[in-house]
Image (cartoon, rainbow, N blue to C red):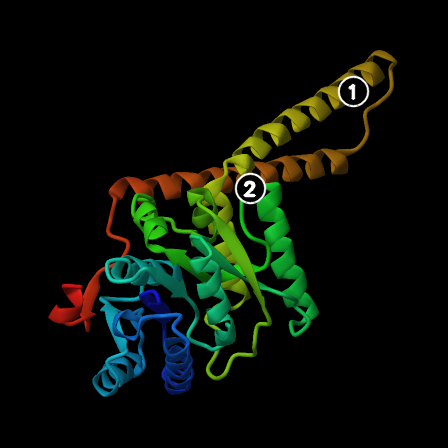
Amino acid sequence: MGCGLYLVVPCYNEEEVLPETTKRLNDKMERMCREGLIDDGRSKVLYVNDGSKDRTWELIQQIHRENPRFTGISLAHNMGHQNALLAGLMTAKDYADAVISMDADLQDDVEVLDEMIKKYMDGNDIVYGVRSSRKKDTFFKRFSAESFYRVMSAMGVKTVFNHADYRLTSKRVLESLKDFREVNLFLRGIFPLIGYTSDVVLYERNERFAGESKYPFKKMLAFAWDGITSFTVKPLKAISVIGILISFISLLFLLHFLLTKLLGYTVQGWTSVICSIWLVGGLQLFCLGIIGEYIGKIYGEVKQRPRYIIEENLLDAAEQEI
């Protein structure tokens, strides 16, 4: 008998792509059921409506009525991709042996789901979907994405290179994830911390089927910064290094000016003095900004507000008793 599999798919304003996503996922689930990879009675697709402003939730409800293989939960308001994904994972873990998270835009190749399940059956608790190449990306997109992973690695944050949120996780991994109580979520960094046996599946990322990307450059930059400040204090250590370095350089200049004074030379260079003041002032503000980011995160964590609130749940009583 195959495993009970849940596909968790966060959705935010996905009405354009949802019908095609449903069709492809249904076809794939049927094939996996016929091949004995998954148990038809215990396998579902769980859509997570992250406070969409279009007809996404109405479509999810309609799809659920037409095909019980599809179900969904709706968050009370938009909580962001990571929180919506967490809500789906924490809901699915009570019913599934394994959960695969993926995006709704069909960029994640559904044809590698079989390989993920097989690697899970071979004893892997986490199977990461990793892009085989970035040839389809623009130069800027490729450069910025790869730079992100390299910077994260340099900062000491353990991530899987070229992996986003397309992954399989076993039930016991999700039980461990439940103990991570942080409000500032960066799931790509949390799963490697959990441990357990893992493997990767390579796939070619497709073009978005319809709609617009929910991660423009500004959001991607903010996401990267959240990942760094959530997992490492190296930026704070860098501030100390910068302070020591500036103090050392200032000492050298002080010795230089004292020497020129003793030798009777007139000290010239008001421009250099003003530039130095502006430079040091700018560095101070920058460093204060970094410290402020960390203080802000501490403020968010100590309030312990819920990371998501589920307003509606289409899982019926029979499913919740499984």
Residues packed near mark 2 inside 10 Å, few (<14), some (14 to 19) or many (20 plus):
few
Number of dots carrying numbers:
2
Q: Disc 2 designates what residue?
A: 286
Placement of 288 over or under 133, stated as above or below = above
Instruction: Name the secondary structure under disc 2.
Output: helix
Tag nearer the camera, 2 or 1: 2
Closest to the observer: 99 or 61? Answer: 99
Quarter of the image for residue 145 reads: bottom right
Residue receiving disc 1: 257
Q: Report x, y in % for residue 83.
A: 34, 58
Amino acid type assigned to the residue bearing label 1 in the image? Phe
Task: Name the side, left or right, on which 237 lies relative to 65.
Answer: right
> What's the amino acid at mark 2?
Phe
Residue 202 is tagged as: none
Q: Residue at x 44, y 49 (%)?
A: 191
| Closer to us: 285 or 296 | 296
Check if mark 2's residue and mark 1's residue have beta carbons within 8 Å: no
